[in-house]
Image (cartoon, grey):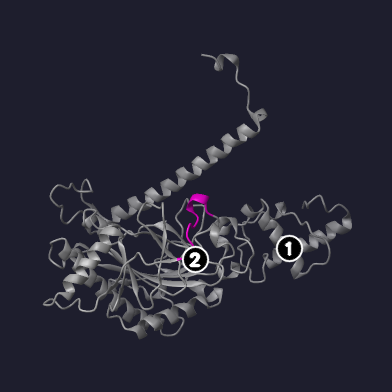
């Protein structure tokens, strides 16, 4: 066993060995926050002397995290929950994003650019109120692909209770949340970050997710059983949001000059997935994102958020961003890729992300309304003078796979470009490292 050379004499080596044993047994933290099975212990230097205390162990751990030893700790699989990291002074490298991906606008610099639309009177087909609501929704979808709705008919008490249950779930001890660990391909449960394979940077969030429609496909073993009442309340909540989503799709169908059930029918057997996001307070929020920039793949998404703020949107390909103003009891409506394609690009797919802050945690509940995997994706109507934005019909499953594969490939190419840039810079800084070529390989 080799230790750092700064521990030179036998007495200091003995202290180092004692401390090494403590570290290994404690797995760096009292709560065993790391899976230490793949740590290369024989490469781990013990740089501190003195008695073995929790303070010295913490300092040694901080040293290891601040040096190149960090890769020895498999971060993507070792952190059980983010709650344990919220009080650290610096952000761990696995959460640090490239400068071009970092937040440009604070989480609480709110904008009123995203329309807030009251749905009061939307069922009044005789009066002019429905037509006015439809006009506002269509304008929002053509401009942003995102808007907020109030007076939507979902009971305020139900919304409050759903938020309370979600808050209490994330306050549970790590071992309780990890009973629903969804790693290994499980369809629903609890997970930290939830990033794609091939991506090196994690999102600063915890989620619990499960499928609620079609009802026949519900797997209640993946639904949290704590706090008490979660399942029953979610069943009620998901039913109400399914109804609201279908009502909004009726409006968009009519705006396209189609039968009002056209968009809903295009989903075949509409799938509903609930994702509850918890964004703990973050030590360095300017370096990371709670959820990276993206568009939703499905038809339409209804998001319930608390009053902290953090949802951001852009409509100019990321050149400028706004933070969406939280409205008590409102649902933020995002149009997804599927809705974008069905409208032949007329309605935008909302380009958005979530940022975090250092003062308080944030909670949101996203309800994704998606088509069935076998549903055909192709414009339902192509206006005169336009061409279809898809070359040929594809299934939603194929569309989703293409989207995810593209994101993974873009992440790979970006990482490769960064590595090549770093190698080029090293050659500029250290020209003596370049292997000289023969003269006949230099001149033409």
Which residue is denoted by mark 2 in the rendering?
A: 205
Q: Is residue 330 left or right of residue 37?
A: left
Decide: marks 1, 2 in contact (CB < 8 A)?
no
Residue 396 drawn above or below residue 88: above
Residue 72: image quadrant is: bottom right
Q: Earlier in the sequence, mark 1 or mark 2?
A: 1
Q: Is residue 261 left or right of residue 39?
A: left
Q: Which residues are magenta?
A: 97-109
At 26% from the left and 57% from the top, the residue drawn is: 340
Q: Is residue 225 visible?
A: no
Q: CA separation, marks 1 and 2?
A: 26 Å
Residue 367, position as x, y percentages in the image: 34, 70
Q: Main secondary structure of the magenta part?
A: loop
Residue 77 covered by magenta stretch: no
In front: 326, or 197?
326
Q: Secondary structure at mark 2?
A: loop
Residue 87: image quadrant is: bottom right
Residue 384, position as x, y percentages in the image: 12, 50
Q: Is residue 142 left or right of residue 292?
A: left
In front: 183, or 376?
376
Farthest-out residue, left = 126
Residue 126 drawn above or below residue 386: below
Which residue is denoted by mark 1 in the rendering?
A: 59
Q: Secondary structure at mark 1?
A: helix
The numbered mark at residue 47 is none
Q: Is residue 422 visible?
A: yes
Instruction: Estimate how packed mark 2 is, as few (under 14), some (14 to 19) or many (20 or more) residues with alpha carbons within 10 Å.
Output: many
At 49% from the left and 66% from the top, the residue drawn is: 205
Residue 16, position as x, y percentages in the image: 80, 59
């Amino acid at each position: 066993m080799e230790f750092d050379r700064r521990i030179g004499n036998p007495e200091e080596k003995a202290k180092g060995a004692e401390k090494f044993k403590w570290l290994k047994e404690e797995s760096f933290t009292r709560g065993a926050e790391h899976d230490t099975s793949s740590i290369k212990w024989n490469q781990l230097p013990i740089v501190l002397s003195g008695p073995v205390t929790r303070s010295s162990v913490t300092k040694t751990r901080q040293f290891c995290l601040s040096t190149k030893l960090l890769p020895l700790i498999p971060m993507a699989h070792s952190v059980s929950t983010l709650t344990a990291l919220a009080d650290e002074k610096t952000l761990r490298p696995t959460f640090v994003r490239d400068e071009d991906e970092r937040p440009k606008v604070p989480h609480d610099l709110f904008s009123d650019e995203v329309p807030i639309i009251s749905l009061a009177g939307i069922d009044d087909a005789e009066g002019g109120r429905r037509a006015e609501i439809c006009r506002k929704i269509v304008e929002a979808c053509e401009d942003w692909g995102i808007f907020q709705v109030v007076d939507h008919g979902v009971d305020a008490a139900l919304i409050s209770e759903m938020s309370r249950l979600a808050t209490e779930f994330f306050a549970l001890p790590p071992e309780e949340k990890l009973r629903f660990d969804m790693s290994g391909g499980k369809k629903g449960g609890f997970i930290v970050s939830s990033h794609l394979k091939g991506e090196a940077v994690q999102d600063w969030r915890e989620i619990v997710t499960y499928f609620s429609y079609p009802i026949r496909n519900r797997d209640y073993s993946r639904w949290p059983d704590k706090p008490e009442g979660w399942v029953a309340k979610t069943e009620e909540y998901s039913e109400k949001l399914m109804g609201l989503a279908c009502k909004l799709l009726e409006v968009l169908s009519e705006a396209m000059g189609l039968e009002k059930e056209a968009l809903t029918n295009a989903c075949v057997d509409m799938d509903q997935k609930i994702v509850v996001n918890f964004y703990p307070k973050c030590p360095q929020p300017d370096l990371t994102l709670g959820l990276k920039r993206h568009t939703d793949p499905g038809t339409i998404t209804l998001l319930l958020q608390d009053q902290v703020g953090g949802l951001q949107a852009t409509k100019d390909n990321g050149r400028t961003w706004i933070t969406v103003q939280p409205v008590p009891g409102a649902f933020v409506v995002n149009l997804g890729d599927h809705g974008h394609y069905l409208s032949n690009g007329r309605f935008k797919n909302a380009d958005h992300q979530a940022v975090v802050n250092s003062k308080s945690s944030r909670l949101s509940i996203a309800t994704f309304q998606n088509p069935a995997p076998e549903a055909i994706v192709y414009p339902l109507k192509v206006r005169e003078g336009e061409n279809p934005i898809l070359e040929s019909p594809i299934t939603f499953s194929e569309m989703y796979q293409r989207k995810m594969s593209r994101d993974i490939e873009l992440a790979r190419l970006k990482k490769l470009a960064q590595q090549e840039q770093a190698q080029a810079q090293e050659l500029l800084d250290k020209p003596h490292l370049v292997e000289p070529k023969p003269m006949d390989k230099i001149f033409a």
